[in-house]
Image (spheres, rainbow, N blue to C red):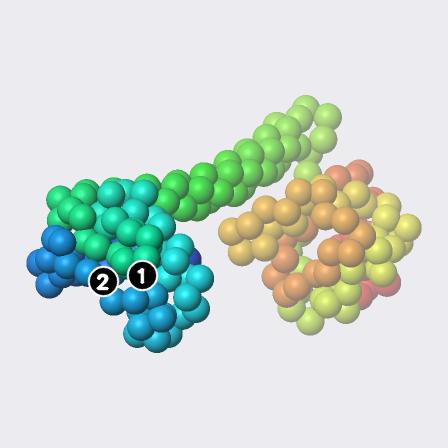
Amino acid sequence: MDYTENSEKITIPRYLKIAVDIAARIASGSLAEGEKLKGRSILSTEYNVSSETIRRSMSILSDKKVVQIKAGRGIFILSRNQAVEFINNFKSDEILHKMNDNLSGLLKKRLELDEEIANTTKQIADMYKYLRSDLIKPVEIILPEDSHVIGKSIGELQIWHNTGATIIGIIQDKQIIISPGPYFEFTPKDKVLIVGDEHVIERFNAFVNEII
């Protein structure tokens, strides 16, 4: 599996990119061991960066024993093998960073999925409780498409005040909404689950059908 695919791009410092580029040139043989590199001012012009950026790049390569900095004389290529090792280590670190990014993304998605599963499980449990209770038998009423309640909220319509019905759930398409709050707005063909005695059910039916 190529862990470098489908990963967010990692921002690599400019000085490190330059160090890797020079190491790659040494590893490929275009720059030979013992050869003196161009001066910092020339390299800074070539890479379009400051002399300080070049200094940091050379410091990294010196620490990795890819080049040797000789005071007053310049920078000399020390080891092709060390250049190859530096590049390989850099690639490994880059892949690890990308793998960590992928893992973080997967963990985030997993948490979101776990939360969604937990919410759905609660909805199922609540609905099962309502449907299987010996004390509460919900009645399902489908709202007419031209009902005056369409587009209005439960609170605005004062459902309980006007009908005495308690709405325990709404079925919208294949979605079950448990205990909808006062801001829930009805849509055409909503299946409203209510509880109450026969008179309450009659009043609710009359209310949504405008037979009031």
Instruction: Give the alpha-carbon distance from disc 1 to disc 2, as whole Å.
Output: 13 Å
Q: Please say whether residue 51 is visible from this viewpoint.
A: yes
Sequence-wise first label, 1 or 2: 1
Q: Please say whether residue 4 is visible from this viewpoint.
A: no
- Decide: few, some or many residues near mark 2? Use Cα within 10 Å; few <14, some 14-19, many ≥20: some
- Quarter-of-image position of residue 64: top left
Q: Residue at x 80, y 52 (%)?
A: 182
Tag 1: amino acid: Ile
- Quarter-of-image position of residue 136: top right
Determine the secondary structure under disc 1.
Answer: helix
Tag 2: amino acid: Leu
Q: Residue at x 68, y 24 (%)?
A: 134
Q: Residue at x 21, y 55 (%)?
A: 76
The answer to whether 146 appears left or right of 197 in the picture is: left
Q: Verify CB contact (< 8 Å) between mark 1 and mark 2.
A: no
Q: Which residue is mark 2?
A: 37
The answer to whether 59 appears left or right of 168 in the picture is: left
Residue 182 vs residue 187, the one in the foreground? 182
Determine the secondary structure under disc 2.
Answer: loop
Residue 22 vs residue 203, the one in the foreground? 22
User: Which tag is nearer the camera, tag 1 or tag 2?
Assistant: 2
The answer to whether 47 appears left or right of 110 in the picture is: left
Q: Which mark is residue 101?
A: none
Q: Which residue is mark 1?
A: 18
Q: Residue at x 40, y 46 (%)?
A: 101
Quadrant housing the C terminus: bottom right
